[in-house]
Amino acid sequence: MAGKMGALEILLNLLDVHPELGSSAPLMQSVKQGRWAVVSRSEATTVLRDMARRVGEDPTHFALHSGRIGGATQLAKQGASVVQIQRAGRWKSGAFMTYVRAGGDGANCVSRALASS
């Protein structure tokens, strides 16, 4: 396939190739001993860190919550409201604040959004 594929397109292609997975199957699966099995936390972390290493990043700086951290921080930097950040990360409380990193004024943006709420 030429060009980049989005996550949804990749998922739909996976379901086309493996219709036995069904619509209620866990998203993160692999074949183990000839059967589909849920990918463990340690397996997912290993894959993520291997990808980071391949693109020249320090793998010790990456964990499974790196995407949530990056997403919350980026939304804050872009001026998203508290409610927008909570919805994007499916947070029902202020717990998302622990994910926003200070780099690039992300934490300051969240503080301003909280003050204006």
Image (spheres, rainbow, N blue to C red):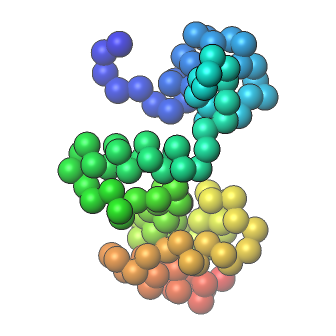
Q: Position of residue 24 (x, y in %)?
A: 78, 28
Camera sees residue 79: no
Question: Which quadrant of the figure has residue 89?
Answer: bottom right
Q: Nearer the viewer, residue 106 or 22?
A: 22
Task: Please give left or right for residue 97 compared with residue 3 in the image.
Answer: right
Q: Nearer the viewer, residue 22 or 60?
A: 60
* Residue occupying image coordinates x 70% and y 65%: 91
Q: Position of residue 81 (x, y in %)?
A: 58, 71
- Quadrant where the N terminus is found in the figure: top left
* Residue occupying image coordinates x 36% and y 64%: 61
Q: Position of residue 66 (x, y in %)?
A: 47, 60
* Residue occupying image coordinates x 24% and y 45%: 55
Q: Is residue 85 above or below residue 51?
A: below
Q: Is residue 96 above or below residue 51?
A: below
Which residue is farthest right?
24
Q: Is residue 57 above or below residue 31?
A: below
Number of disc labels: 0
* Residue occupying image coordinates x 52% and y 24%: 9
Which residue is farthest left?
56
Camera sees residue 5: yes
Which residue is farthest front?
33
Which residue is farthest bottom?
115
Question: Which quadrant of the figure has residue 62?
Answer: bottom left
Task: Please give left or right for residue 52 compared with residue 67 in the image.
Answer: left
- Quadrant where the C terminus is found in the figure: bottom right
Q: Nearer the viewer, residue 37 or 99?
A: 37
Task: Please give left or right for residue 9 compared with residue 74 in the image.
Answer: right
Q: Nearer the viewer, residue 27 or 106?
A: 27
